Image (tube, helix red, strand yellow):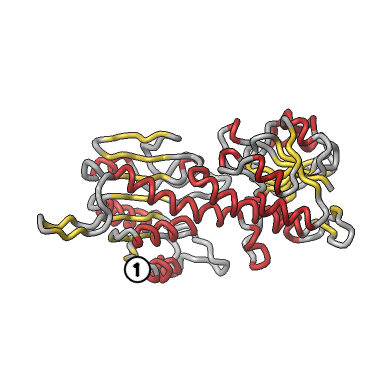
Amino acid sequence: MRIAFLDESKSGEPRVAVTPETATKLKALGASLVAEKGAGAGSAIPDAAYEAAGVTIAKNANEAVKEADVLLAVRRPKPELAAKMKSGALLLGIMDPHGNDEALKPFAEKGLSLFAMELMPRITRAQVMDVLSSQANLAGYRAVIDAAEVFGRAFPMMMTAAGTVPAAKVFVMGAGVAGLQAIATARRLGAIVTATDVRPAAKEQVASLGAKFIAVEDEEFRQAETAAGYAKPMSAEYQAKQAVLVAEHIAKQDIVITTALIPGRPAPRLVSQAMVESMRPGSVIVDLAVERGGNCEVSKADQIVEHGGVKIVAWSNTPGRIAPSASALYARNLFAFLETMIDKKEGRLAVNFDDELVKATLLTKDGALVHPIFAPKA
């Protein structure tokens, strides 16, 4: 059982799919590992650290994958790499399949089995494999650090003989994994934090972190969550009331962090240009959803835009801005999933295609797109 991983920094991805820690664990399960030269450079892991863990270093990507039974990746590789892999190999990573059927075809035609880690079901058994949560957690943290750097003022209230510097006011839009971590981080830095979300259950979570919840809490809001914990679509009347409340609140904030990102869909527009223009000069917006179009109307991917004195920070790969930590967590997610596909007694691959986790994440198999969402309809 041969497992490969690549240097993805050449395509702008500093994270790596395997760390020396997970390489050691994979070797204990009977695997041999090969890495493309420089695979961990973006995450501060030298080739020597991999070699000490028993990983063979290949001079290039083609050399690394040609005999691999499994390729572990952060992002979906370029289509031309599929031709270099052997038929029947497994490929695990963040595949971004929505709207990318053509990009998946070369892998399917080669007979590869692709697994999209972002489609992992959010059930108890799969928590340790949930790449969306592990990476969003770090993104929420890094968003606050980026905001503090660009803001250029103190976060906590500073009391001095020369007078008092007021605490920064931070508003977090969206109280999912990224939002809750942003709240916790901003609170630890001493900011006055408020947050909003369309799910009623989020109010208690926000309050537990010491922040104030902002929402129009009418009867419709109280019924705005499904039994599975997802938000229901809100009426146009409610959305209008909420928009007025949020607009009034944003005008008083120093920092706004937006976190509303739904895989496979355009990001909801939460902050209009008019809202940006209502903020004081020197204020900051951090948009964590720019990879799907952005929550802020004036965001531009991988830029810090200044609009009317307000700076809008919009990095498309925020977890990659804290790559060593992000890689450590991501590699553990991958290991936990791949481990379920390995016969530990025989030290070989033994994929159970009836496993609910496999069914939920498998995109291609035996030359075809097989995932129910992406497979061609009869």
Q: Is 226 placed above or below 24 here?
A: below
Q: Please name whichever residue, 320 or 42, is drawn nearer the observer in this view of the structure.
A: 42
Residue appearing at x 53%, y 62% in the figure: 230
Residue 331: % across, % down: 64, 51
Residue appearing at x 10%, y 55% in the figure: 162
Q: Is residue 377 visible?
A: no
Residue 239: % across, % down: 37, 55
Residue appearing at x 14%, y 58% in the figure: 160
* Count of numbered tags: 1
Q: Could you tell me which quadrant the C terminus lies in?
A: top right
Q: Please name whichever residue, 152 or 86, is drawn nearer the observer in this view of the structure.
A: 152
Q: Amino acid at mark 1?
A: Gly
The part of the image, by quadrant, that contains residue 104 is top right
Residue designated by label 1: 210
Residue appearing at x 24%, y 45% in the figure: 279
Q: Is residue 363 left or right of residue 226?
A: right
Q: Is residue 262 visible?
A: yes
